[in-house]
Each structure stands twice: as C-alpha cells, then as structure tokens.
Image (cartoon, grey):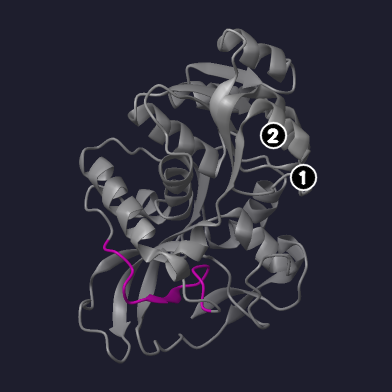
Amino acid sequence: MKAWQVQELAKPADALELTEVAAPTPGTGQVQVRVLSAALNFPDVLMCQGLYQIRPELPFTPGAELCGEITALGDGVTDRKVGDRIIGMAALPHGGFAETALMPADSPLAPEQLDDDAAAVLTIAYQTAWAALFHRAQLTKDDTVLVQAAAGGVGSAAVQLAKLNGNRVIAVVGGPEKAQAAKGLGADVVIDRKVEDVIAQVKAATDGRGADVIFDPVGGDAYDLLAKCVAFEGRIVVVGFSGGRIQAPPLNHVLLKNYSILGLHWGYYQTMRPSVIAQGYAELSRLAANGDIRPLISGRLSFDELPQGLTELAAGKTVGRLVWHPTH
C-alpha cells in the first residue's frame, strides 16, 4: 500500500516521504480500515517534528484522525464487523495518511447523516470544543463566549457549538477571509486582530464587562491579550499552544479579577475518564442526526498534496479544516 511516512523528524515538507509498505495487521482490540478520509490536525505537524507528547518510533505514518471502513478484525473484536464505517483516532504508528490504517476496535460508528469528510473531522476538534465549553467551563446560556482563532479547525467547532447552545459569540480572527468565515459560522461579533483593537472591541461588545468564557487554542501573545478581556468570575480554557509560546500567566491578575484558568488535554480523558468522551460523542451524534453540525471544510487534498497542506496548516494559512483522500 502507499503511505506517507516520517523517516526523519523535521517540518512536514521535509519529514514526509511517500513509501510503499505492507498493509498493517490489526492487533488485539484493533481493526484494519480502508481510509476514506483523514483530517489534518496541528498535532500531526508537531508529530512530524518530534514536538508532540506522543512520539512514535521512526518510521511512522502520521494522521491522527480519520474516517475508515473496516476491512479486517483483530483478536477479541466482537462488536464490530467488516464493512462498518467508523471514526476517531488512529492506532499509531499506523496513522491515517495511508491507504490502510489501524484504529481501536471501540471507535464509534460514523453518524449516517455525515459524509466521509464531515465524519473524519468530528472527533478531535468537536470533542475538544465540546469538552472545553460544556465539561470544563460549564457553559450556561447566559454566558458570552469569546473564541480565539475562530476560523480555524477547533475554533470553528467552538463557535458552532456555542451558537447551537444559544450563546452570544465573539470571534477573534486574523484577516478578512477568516473574518468572513466566522460570520458564516454565525458569530455575533467578529474582530480582526490584524486591524482592530481586540480589547477595545471586546469591551464595547460587552458593555465593558468582558467575556464570560474564553476559548484559547493559541496561547502565547494571544493569551496575554485575551486575559485582559475576561469578565469578573470568567473562565479561560486553554486548549493548545499553536502560537508557539507557552504563556506564564501572572496569578495576581487571576486573583484580582476572580477568574479561573482551566486546562483541557482532551486525549487524556480516554485514559482517566472515558465517560466524558462517550458523553461528548453522544451529544455530537445527536446534533449530527438533527443536521445541526456542518463542519467548515475548506480543502480536500489529493494524495500528493498532503505535505503542502500540513505546511499551510502550520503557518496558520488555513480556514476551517483540511481533509486528505488516499484515492484522489
């Protein structure tokens, strides 16, 4: 089978090499799948460079999130069958950027209402956004939500879920194309950080009170700025550091404004509290069945376009989600 493999740790364009390898055999509790669609995620970029918390041995096939059709069952698998369409996380090192991948056998069935591409992006971004807003921040309908990088993969999911919950949403983006995308998602207020004063605009939009819940997948300088936009007794949920710098927030500011800083490492719930993931999937499946979830997919990449797609994702040039097809 054909696969993109990381032979040496480097930026995606240098790390990825097109190879011909044997299809992986599923182990106990795993299934082999034909990759229908694989999502591009920032952790894939970090994994290519050896900067992610999961570091598979070289060589490995990245592609953490996908939708696949089961083609073979591993030992002990009884609740799945060949032909099932499932979604979720790949069983690395046999990731989704290949014609064939491995996945845990307990991966959920893909919602029938979603096509392969929409199903492929339902796991990481939407589960992260759901867990951040509803499990960690305990979002109520009266809360004003500020979403940083609102036109990105996880940010766009957060905007959609907050709007579906009936919340007022302030979207912070970088550039006119992303501003237009955030408006299309239903954000009530859109702030282009490249040309507007974010703090002044947030204060104007909230009568000086600030945002009750801030969703931040960027960190660094973006966090420093948004910390000045949080309301009294507000909550900032830190979900990533795509900005490249891990912030060190001054705790005296936390004390003076009585707000909370909450962390979210979504993948850790699979080990520590899988019921949270199950609850999130149940809610997302309900929304998908109702036709409420409409993932913002801006690009569908052919086999050869994967390295360039990951490069653009790393540079923050993408809007919404990119998906990759091994057969196109």
Determine whether label 1 and label 2 are within 8 Å by CB: no
Is 179 placed left or right of 74 in the picture?
Answer: right
User: Main structural element of the magenta stretch: helix, strand or loop?
Assistant: loop
Amino acid type assigned to the residue bearing label 1 in the image: Gln
What residue is at 64 percent from the left and 55 percent from the top?
310
Name the spot of residue 147 as percent of width and height, x first. 56, 31
In the image, residue 43 sits, relative to residue 16, either above or below, namely: above
Instruction: Read off the magenta span.
Output: 94-109
Question: In the visual, does 215 lie left or right of 166?
Answer: right
- Which of the 4 quarters of the picture holds residue 261? top right
- Determine which residue is flagged by label 1: 247
Residue 271 in percent (x, y) is at 46, 70
Report how many numbered discs are placed on residues in the image: 2
- Which residue lies under the disc numbered 2? 254
Residue at point 67% right, 65% down?
52
For residue 246, above or below residue 11:
above
Instruction: Please determine whether, in this image, residue 202 is positioned above or below residue 23.
Output: above
Q: Is residue 320 visible?
A: no
Please check the rendered image and state whether residue 107 is part of the magenta-colored stretch, yes or no: yes
Q: Determine whether the residue tagged by mark 2 lies in a helix, strand or loop.
A: helix
Residue 161 in the magenta stretch? The answer is no
> Mark 1, mark 2: which one is toward the viewer?
2
Identify residue type, mark 2.
Val
- Measured in 3D between alpha carbons, the distance from the residue under mark 1 to the one under mark 2, in whole angstroms, is 14 Å
For the point 65% across and 68% down, which residue is it?
53
Query: Residue 293 at what x, y percent from top left?
Result: 33, 39
